[in-house]
Image: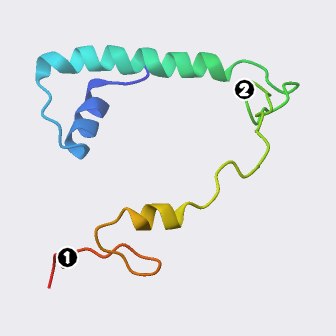
Amino acid sequence: MLINRKEVQQIAVLAKLNVSEDEIDTIVTSLDSVVEMINHINEVDTNEVKPMANPMDAVQRLRADEVTETSNKEVLLSMATNADEDYFLVPTVVE
């Protein structure tokens, strides 16, 4: 066993968790299996494996950066109830 009851109790105190005595054995078993899995993964020789920046090693296709809409400021301001030269005018909300 890599994790024991005392360690689980200490972790529970530090994490301010209420863990009953019945739950401790289940937690010990679960944490122990996680630590064993991590140790098993660490045993794999990865010296000749090249690090990847992206698991897909794909390049994102981007569309051309072209203007698709022109300014329609005058049309929008003409539909406003109250507008200044370049701005919509609204009633004061907060004084």
Kindly identify the residue that appears in the image at 69 percent across and 19 percent down.
43
Give residue 79's position: percent from left, percent from top: 37, 62
Q: Residues within 10 Å of mark 1 (few under 14, many from 20)?
A: few
For badge 1, the amino acid type reads Pro
Q: Nearer the viewer, residue 63 or 15?
A: 63
In front of the other: 79 or 88: 79
Q: Nearer the viewer, residue 93 or 13?
A: 93
- What residue is shown with label 1? 91
Q: Nearer the viewer, mark 1 or mark 2?
A: 1
Mark closest to the chain's N terminus, 1 or 2:
2
44 left or right of 69? Answer: right
Residue furthest out toward the right: 48
Q: Classify mark 2: residues with Cα within 10 Å, few (<14), some (14-19) or many (20+).
A: few
Task: Determine whether the residue tagged by mark 2 lies in a helix, strand or loop.
Answer: loop
Looking at the image, residue 81 lies above or below residue 23: below
Tell me: 20 left or right of 67.
left
Of 73 and 29, nearer the camera is 73
| The C terminus - image quarter | bottom left
Q: Position of residue 56 (x, y in %)?
A: 74, 24
* Residue displayed at 76% across by 38% down: 62
Drawn side of residue 9 relative to residue 7, left or right: left
Q: Residue at x 73, y 18 (%)?
A: 44
- The x and y percentages for residue 94 are 15, 79
Q: Amino acid at mark 2?
A: Pro
Residue 47 at x, y percent in the picture: 84, 27
Return the mark for residue 24: none
Residue 55's disc is 2
